[in-house]
Image: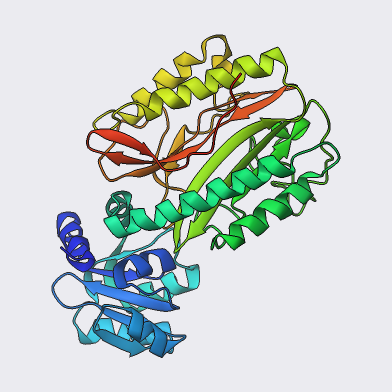
Amino acid sequence: MNRIEKIKREMKKDQVDCIILFGSRNIYYASGTAQFSICVIPLDSDPVIFIKRNFERGKRETWIKDVIKLNSTKDVIEELKDRKLDKGKIGIEMNFVRVNQYLKLKRSLDTDFVDINPLFYRLRMIKEKEEVESIRKAAKAVENVQKVCKEVLQPGITELEVAAEVSKEARRNGSWSPITSFYWDSNGFVLASGENLYTPGDFPILSGVGLSKATPRSASRRVLKEGDIFVLDFATNVEGYHADHARTYFIGNPSSKYKKLYKLVHNALQRIENQVLVGKEIGALFKETKRQMGEYQEYFQGFNGYRQGLGHGVGLELDEPPGLVEQNTQKFQAGMVLAIEPKLIIPKWGAIDFEDTVYLHPDSTEVLTKSPFEEF
């Protein structure tokens, strides 16, 4: 079954008559091209893609046969009216469509608009073979990034200088900037040390403090010193698909407390990766992992009432469903690719953060990111 057929099958379930796509990730998934365009998928007729820029390239790339030059959203509206698709239920990406686009559609079409993002996330959660192969390449790239990070860490270097080295390595491995619909920008990594591990940036916890009030995330000009804990949580984007990977390092000779907590979080991650996750409830995994933290449960995934999830899906966006949160009663499915990230964040001390990208087989959990751990 090709992707258009998969999409139409889900449209039928949701009783959606037509879809209008504006977001590049869903357009790429549905059409095979990421050129600036609008894609229309009717339930009962063939799809059409309107390409605004690089028309000839987009026409070569897409598997959609009906390709039209886009001048404005008005062209799409006229096509919908010509096809008698201006009534009924139309799906749009509610978290992506600009307000002026939505108002133009609403004025021109006598239809009910519904959010189509859940439909696409259902489809995109289960990866095809070719998608997994691209994620494997991203995983290899981010392993190389972690290797470079470990090599350059030393007293006297700044967080910003480390950021420059790891970013350069990502580019050398064919990684482009990560893509996400959920954050303010496309900064794909958290880099923090010392007190910056528990000082919020523009994200409530473990985000790094950044270089200024205008860019309050990730690397700062803080100078690393003996006794520092250092975390690099880095995402790569190769061929449009992501891998997410974190390791924690110590500058100098690690303390006994660091060794203890390092082992605690490492063992928790290993326990997850050694399980068959398919069929297990997501929230149950969160609760089990939290219990493993014993006396440190109050610092599991955060503190002071804020808790990050235990992980998330990865794919055409860095952060995709499912969210691995305590309240999620959804079950893991074969074909999912997930970032699993157990951590402890302890104010006035530091943090331990590990993250691997894994692929769920029916009978096993395959770890795609394999940077080594310290042996204490």
Q: Position of residue 35 (x, y in %)?
A: 43, 78
Query: Could you tell me which residue is drawn at 44 percent across and 64 percent down?
Result: 239
The percent position of residue 210, horizontal first and vertical second, equals 75, 47
Instruction: Decide if residue 181 is in sight here.
Output: yes
Say which quadrant the N terminus sits in: bottom left
Q: Nearer the viewer, residue 319 or 169?
A: 169
Please tell me in which quadrant of the rendered image residue 133 appears.
bottom left
| Quadrant of the rendered image containing residue 374 | top right
Q: Is residue 244 above or below residue 82?
A: above
Q: As drawn, is 268 to the left or to the right of 29?
A: right
Q: Residue at x 26, y 79 (%)?
A: 64
Apparent side of residue 52 relative to residue 247 in the rendered image (left or right):
left
Number of marks in the rendered image:
0
Residue under the image location 43 percent in, 68 percent down: 24
**Vertical comparison of 61 with 215: above or below:** below
**Which residue sits at x=70%, y=42%?**
151
Q: Quadrant of residue 73?
A: bottom left
Residue 286 in view (yes/no): no
Coloration mode:
rainbow
Residue 226 lies, in percent from the top left, at 82, 28
Report the front residue among 358 and 93: 358
x and y, in percent, of residue 169 in the image: 63, 56
* Position of residue 29 in the picture relative to residue 247 (left or right): left
Q: Is residue 118 above or below residue 153?
A: below
Left/right of residue 333 with respect to residue 270 in the rendered view: left
Q: Which quadrant of the figure contains the C terminus? A: top right
